[in-house]
Image (cartoon, rainbow, N blue to C red):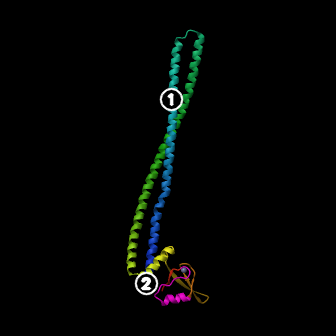
């Protein structure tokens, strides 16, 4: 293999490594997305439960006020009872007192039920808060791990970019222009090996970039010229495998 082609082959090896490392660097933080979603979901559930607990507490407070106001009414009526003159008035007042006492007892039962609901919501909030904290800690730990991995990839990238600069220094300038153009056009692979195999007693050559046949004339040119030879199908710069 001539020097021109050899430099491009070295460059392709480095460029493939760079491409993979750059992709890894992009991909790494996406591993956090699932954990971030879990944390947002847990936080939202907690907020919802806290709101429910608040509403239930307001219900308790409101019913408590009703009970107190009934108590005031009942005490007032009981005082009135002492000053009553007739039996009929007495019975009527007594009935009123009993009705209010029944109402009061009913609301007290409701307060009790609402309070146990508040307790339920509160203990649920406590459990959810612990869950949110645990998710946060998990996300923090994962973030640190990913950041470490990204730093490692960045260190490798710096090495590869330095190596690239080194190769660029000894590469043919015109060949480089062709290479760079193909690198962009052909999805990061500008150079392809030609594979030789014998099928039915005949030599057959394949471009490993596109898996299409390469003519023997092309292979002959590859062996005789120092110019760059391209694949007729994909346009990549060809080199002979093991050549
Ligand atoms: Zn090809």
Indicate the position of residue 85 as horizontal and vertical percent values. 56, 9
Q: Position of residue 221 (x, y in %)?
A: 51, 89
Q: Which mark is residue 129?
A: none
Q: Which residue is more in the foreground, 90 or 226?
A: 226
- Magenta extent: 216-234
Distance between the alpha carbons at the discs numbered 2 and 1: 91 Å
Q: Position of residue 50 (x, y in %)?
A: 49, 42
Q: Position of residue 195 (x, y in %)?
A: 53, 83
Q: Secondary structure at mark 1?
A: helix
Residue with the mark numbered 2: 4
In the rendered view of the protein, which quadrant contains the N terminus? bottom left
Picture residue at 42% right of the left edge, 67% below the top: 153
Give the farthest residue toward the right.
200
Q: Is label 1's Cβ within 8 Å of ligand 1?
A: no
Callout 2 crowding tier (Cα within 10 Å): few <14, some 14–19, many ≥20: some
Circles 2 and 1, Cβ within 8 Å, touching? The answer is no
Decide: few, some or many residues near mark 1? Use Cα within 10 Å; few <14, some 14-19, many ≥20: some
Q: Nearer the viewer, mark 2 or mark 1?
A: 2
Residue nearer the viewer, 233 or 196 = 233
Local SS, label 2:
helix
Would you place residue 8 above or below residue 62 in this image?
Answer: below
Sequence-wise, which precedes: disc 2 or disc 1? Answer: 2
User: Is residue 220 a member of the stretch shown in magenta?
Assistant: yes
The residue at 53%/17% (across/down) is 77
What residue would you read off at disc 1? Answer: 64
Look at the picture and state if 56 lies above or below 85.
below
Q: How many marks?
A: 2
Q: Is residue 175 magenta?
A: no
Quadrant observed for ligand 1 in the rendered image: bottom right
Q: Is mark 2 within 8 Å of ligand 1?
A: no
């Amino acid at each position: 293999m001539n020097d021109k082609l050899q430099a491009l082959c070295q460059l392709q090896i480095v460029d493939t490594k760079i491409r993979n490392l750059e992709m890894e660097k992009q991909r790494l933080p996406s591993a956090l997305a699932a954990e971030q979603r879990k944390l947002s979901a847990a936080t939202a559930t907690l907020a919802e439960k806290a709101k429910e607990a608040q509403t239930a507490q307001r219900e308790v407070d409101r019913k408590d006020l009703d009970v107190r106001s009934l108590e005031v009414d009942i005490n007032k009526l009981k005082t009135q009872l002492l000053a009553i003159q007739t039996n009929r008035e007495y019975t009527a007042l007594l009935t009123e007192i009993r009705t209010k006492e029944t109402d009061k007892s009913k609301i007290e039962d409701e307060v009790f039920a609402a309070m146990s609901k508040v307790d339920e919501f509160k203990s649920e909030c406590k459990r959810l808060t612990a869950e949110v904290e645990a998710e946060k800690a998990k996300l923090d730990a994962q973030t640190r791990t990913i950041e470490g991995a990204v730093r490692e990839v960045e260190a490798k990238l710096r090495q590869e970019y330095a190596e690239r600069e080194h190769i660029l220094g000894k590469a043919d300038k015109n060949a480089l222009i062709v290479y760079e153009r193909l690198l962009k056009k052909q999805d990061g692979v500008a150079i392809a090996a030609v594979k030789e195999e014998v099928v039915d007693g005949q030599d057959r050559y394949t471009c490993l970039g596109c898996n299409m046949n390469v003519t023997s004339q092309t292979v002959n040119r590859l062996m005789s010229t120092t110019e760059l030879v391209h694949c007729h199908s994909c346009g990549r710069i060809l080199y002979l495998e093991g050549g």
